[in-house]
C-alpha cells in the first residue's frame, strides 16, 4: 500500500448507533499481509498490555490464564493475515448490541466489558470477524457468573464478554502494542483526521508499508 492520502466524502445524516457514535474520524491499524510471517508477536504484545491493565502477569512464569489477545493472526493458504477491529465510524457492532455496551470514544470503538452480556450479536454483525466472546479474567482468575452453574457439579460458569482491539487505550503514549512489537513492521497505525468544514470531509492518512 502506498503512502497516498485518501479523501472520502461523508454524508451529513445520523451516524452510529443512537448516541454511541459520533463524527470523529476513526484511526485503525492496517497490515501489509504480504510481509507477515505469522510469528504472532503482535498477539503476545497485545495480551501483555491488556493483561497488565487487568492485574494479570504478562512475563514468563507469571501468566496463569489463557493467552487471549484482542488481535489474532489467521492463515489463508500460504499467507498470514492479522485480523483486528477497523473502528468503523458507523459501527455495525454498536447497532447490533442490545444493551448499548459498545460506544465510540474519540474515534475508537470501545466495548464496556461490565455491561456486555456475551450474546454474540456484535460477533455476527462485524464484517471483518474482528470480535470474539471470551471468558473474563481479573487478577489472574476467571470471573464467574452469579446465577448460571454447570449441571454436573453445580460450579459457577465463567462470565464471558465481547473482546476486540481497542488501540491499546490503556497505554500512555497511545501507540498500539502490536505495531511496536512487529519485527517486520507489517502493522501501521492509520490516523483519521476530521475536517470541520460543512462538507464533513474525512481525510485518512495511510502510512507507507
Image: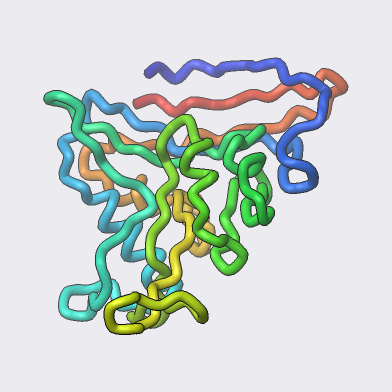
Q: In this view, does 203 lie above or below 116?
A: above
Q: Residue 155 in the image: state x and y as whole percent.
A: 34, 83
Instruction: Give the camera-side residue of 160 and 2.
Output: 160
Instruction: Give the camera-side residue of 151 and 28.
Output: 151
Instruction: Give the camera-side residue of 2 and 151.
Output: 151
Residue at screen point 58% across, 69% down: 114
- Say which quarter of the image contains residue 93: top right
Residue at screen point 62% across, 48% down: 97
For this orientation, the residue located farthest to the right is 198
Q: Is residue 146 above or below residue 200?
A: below
Q: Is residue 153 above or below residue 20?
A: below
Q: Quadrant of the C terminus?
A: top left
Q: Is residue 147 left or right of residue 14?
A: left
For this orientation, the residue located farthest to the front is 151
Residue at screen point 57% across, 55% down: 111
Number of dots carrying numbers: 0
For this orientation, the residue located farthest to the left is 78
Residue at screen point 62% across, 65% down: 115
- Say which quarter of the image contains residue 158: bottom left
Q: Which colour scheme is used?
A: rainbow
Q: In which quarter of the image is the N terminus?
A: top left
Q: Residue 208 in the image: state x and y as whole percent.
A: 39, 25
Q: Residue 146 in the image: state x and y as whole percent.
A: 51, 81
Q: Is residue 164 left or right of residue 186?
A: right
- Say which quarter of the image contains residue 34: top left
Q: Residue 112 in the image: state x and y as whole percent.
A: 59, 61
Amino acid at each position: 500500500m502506498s503512502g497516498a492520502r485518501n479523501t472520502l466524502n461523508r454524508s451529513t445524516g445520523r451516524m452510529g448507533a443512537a448516541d454511541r457514535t459520533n463524527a470523529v474520524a476513526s484511526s485503525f491499524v492496517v497490515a501489509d499481509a504480504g510481509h507477515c510471517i505469522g510469528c504472532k508477536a503482535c498477539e503476545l504484545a497485545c495480551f501483555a498490555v491488556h493483561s497488565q491493565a487487568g492485574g494479570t502477569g504478562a512475563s514468563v512464569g507469571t501468566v496463569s490464564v489463557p493467552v487471549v489477545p484482542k488481535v489474532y493472526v489467521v492463515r489463508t493458504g500460504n499467507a498470514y493475515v492479522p485480523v483486528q477491529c477497523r473502528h468503523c465510524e458507523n459501527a455495525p457492532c454498536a447497532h447490533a448490541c442490545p444493551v448499548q455496551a459498545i460506544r465510540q470514544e474519540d474515534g475508537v470503538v470501545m466495548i464496556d466489558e461490565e455491561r456486555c452480556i456475551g450474546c454474540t450479536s456484535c460477533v455476527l454483525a462485524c464484517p471483518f470477524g474482528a470480535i470474539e466472546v471470551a471468558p473474563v479474567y481479573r487478577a489472574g482468575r476467571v470471573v464467574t457468573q452469579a446465577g448460571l452453574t454447570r449441571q454436573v457439579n453445580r460450579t459457577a460458569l465463567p462470565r464471558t464478554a465481547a473482546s476486540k482491539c481497542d488501540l491499546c487505550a490503556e497505554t500512555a503514549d497511545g501507540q498500539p502494542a502490536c505495531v511496536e512489537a512487529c519485527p517486520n513492521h507489517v502493522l501501521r497505525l492509520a490516523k483519521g483526521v476530521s475536517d470541520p468544514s460543512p462538507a464533513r470531509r474525512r481525510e485518512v492518512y495511510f502510512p507507507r508499508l
